[in-house]
Amino acid sequence: MPAPHWKTVKSWLADHQNYVPIEKAECECDADLGEIRRGETGRAPNLTYNPHYVSGDFNFDGVRDFAVLLKNTATSKLVVVVFSRERTGGFRSFPLDIPLSVAGVGLFYGPPRPRPYYLVVSTFGSEGFLVVPVGTEYRLFEPEH
């Protein structure tokens, strides 16, 4: 993750002490990460893919946002925190509880999914949940099958 984003996350974590980053071993996704990094998933190889961080224009305002997966230590729930870039330069945070366990879950954005691109939180190989901007907030939606 770029240093300015990590600085923003660290500052947020200092104010939200029940949340912690997910440890690499908790992901239990080495085989899936290998496939993504080798390009065996229908996408170009992505040598730097991080299942717990992604950036993109999630709310379609022309400004790049980012998201991280964290764990709430008080509830043991998985949480995606969207950091939406404000035009003034700072970030607004939107934590959303995710009804999935920590193991095998990643963040995805962009191709090969069709446009418009939405932030997706899912277990590897499944449809998961769409994180959709609604007004000035974000909400979780299960994709239609």
Image (cartoon, rainbow, N blue to C red):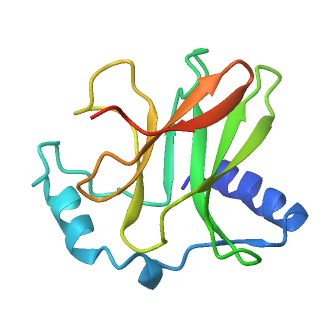
Q: Quadrant of the C terminus?
A: top left
Q: Residue furthest top?
A: 61
Snapshot quadrant of residue 32: bottom left
Q: Residue furthest right?
A: 15
User: 36 or 123: which is nearer to us?
Assistant: 123
User: 102 or 69: which is nearer to us?
Assistant: 102
Whole-percent x, y for residue 110 in the image: 34, 32
The reply, left or right, for residue 114 in relation to residue 62 is left
Image height check: is 21 above or below 10? below
User: 139 or 3: which is nearer to us?
Assistant: 139
Snapshot quadrant of residue 93: top right
* Number of numbered labels in the structure image: 0
Identify the residue shown where x is 51% and y is 54%. Answer: 53
Identify the residue shown where x is 11% and y is 43%. Answer: 42
Identify the residue shown where x is 81% and y is 34%. Answer: 90
The reply, left or right, for residue 110 in relation to residue 2 is left
User: 130 or 41: which is nearer to us?
Assistant: 130
Identify the residue shown where x is 58% and y is 54%. Answer: 68
Image height check: is 119 above or below 6? above
Q: Quadrant of the N terminus?
A: bottom right
Snapshot quadrant of residue 97: bottom right
Image height check: is 24 above or below 128? below
The reply, left or right, for residue 22 in relation to residue 86 is left
Q: Residue furthest bottom?
A: 25
Whole-percent x, y for residue 29 in the image: 31, 73
Whole-percent x, y for residue 133 in the image: 61, 25
